[in-house]
Amino acid sequence: MRNVIGYRMKRPGQDPNDLAAALAAKVVGQATAVSSIVPYVQMYQAGLAPEGRPVGVFLLLGPSGTGKTRTVEALASVLHGSEKNVLRVDCGEYQMEHEVAKLIGAPPGYLGHRETQPMLTQAKLNAVTSERNSVSLVLLDEIEKAAPSMARLLLGVLDKASLRLGDNNTVNFERSMIFMTSNLGASEMLRAMRPDFGFQSMVDQPLEDAASAIERIGMNAVRRKFSPEFINRIDAVIAYRPLDRGSLEAILEQQLAGLQAHISNRLAHRSFPLEVSETAKKFLIERGTSTQYGARELKRTIHRQLIQPIAAMVASGMIEPAEPVYADVDESGERLGLSTEAPPKPKRPKAA
Ligand SMILES: Nc1ncnc2c1ncn2[C@@H]1O[C@H](COP(=O)(O)OP(=O)(O)OP(=O)(O)O)[C@@H](O)[C@H]1O
Ligand SMILES: [Mg+2]
């Protein structure tokens, strides 16, 4: 008999506490998302997920760059060991009614039957599972962009965990978690968060109030867009909060650690340590803060201010292997400067 306890201890991400901690470390500042999703994984691991339904159906709402798509990638990396283990459907590609048919493929005998490989097949679902975990994560990104027939097609999937393809095969979603992301209500959320009326005052309110205001705006937008039958089949609607400064700082540290790992992996023996000063970090946070684009703006700023100049230095052979590269704000105060020379140490006041 398998030692259940030993089995669980050996596998990171299988213990619910580990899983919540591992997810929270990857998706910063979105505790509600983590605590809403983890119990469904836990139910599945315990073999107690209901039959005849997907393991969980989630609608992730909120402004751009707050971690909606990231959550699904992070879950894949925790459960399967790779962010890529996600069957992702970019709903922007299914804006016309006839495009939605591509999801299930044309029936035999119809024009295009041979050419159109359905997007959602059992093989594709199975391909995103792993030896570690048999759950498949399905991401329907930007669901509001799809033609209305997408919601009708999904009703059966959400309700009975099954989808009939054009060739009459059925796809079983009983081992799938389905995540739909959407910006529905996001612009209204942003308006409510504007410092002149709203967010600053919302920030001053207890956190719960701001979160529930965002949730209410999101739910109202969802009700305007989707039918009650569709909404009733969603297990949890999760509203993502705009990222505060502390979260952006944590994301910056993640991004810098990722950049260092990238430099080490890609450049191998030519790699070098990157030292980013506290002033430079503050500069990146300030330039990279945007309510409209969330952490996307921070990533763009890091790219422009740090990654591109580093690439230019590497390309022109200005960096010696293993010699540190220092990033600091330059004299203009308008951009980061890179140097292979250590900045002068700030003088310490003499001990009395
Ligand atoms: N909460 C977060 N924790 C960690 N990283 C984040 C978070 N939010 C955003 N990021 C970073 O920003 C990038 C963009 O975020 P993500 O793709 O999750 O945005 P989104 O909420 O899906 O926005 P959109 O509505 O524009 O698709 C991520 O790849 C990640 O690097
Ligand atoms: Mg997204």
Image (cartoon, grey):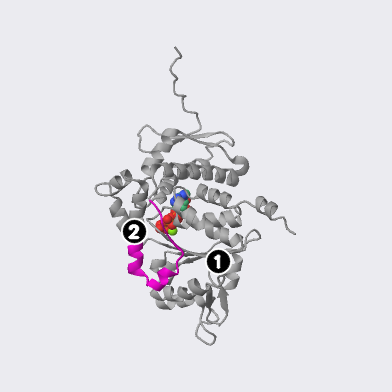
x and y percent of residue 100 in the render?
Answer: 45, 75
Give SS at disc 1: strand
* Nearer the observer, 322 or 106: 106
* Nearer the observer, 198 or 108: 198
Q: Residue at x 61, y 68 (%)?
A: 126
x and y percent of residue 63 in the render?
Answer: 37, 55
Give the magenta range.
Answer: 219-241
Vertical arrangement, residue 269 with respect to residue 107, above or below: above
- Which quadrant holds the C terminus? top left
What amino acid type is highlighted by mark number 1? Ser
The answer to whether residue 18 is magenta is no
Q: Is residue 272 left or right of residue 328?
A: right
Residue 118 shows in this picture: no
Residue depth check, mark 1 versus mark 2: number of the one nearer the observer: 2
Label 2 CA crowd tier, 10 Å (few <14, some 14–19, many 20+): some
Q: Residue at x 37, y 31 (%)?
A: 331
Q: CA distance from mark 1 to mark 2?
A: 28 Å
| Residue at numbered disc 1 | 176
Q: Residue at x 60, y 60 (%)?
A: 45
Give SS at disc 2: helix
x and y percent of residue 54 in the render?
Answer: 53, 68
Residue 319, picture quadrant:
top right
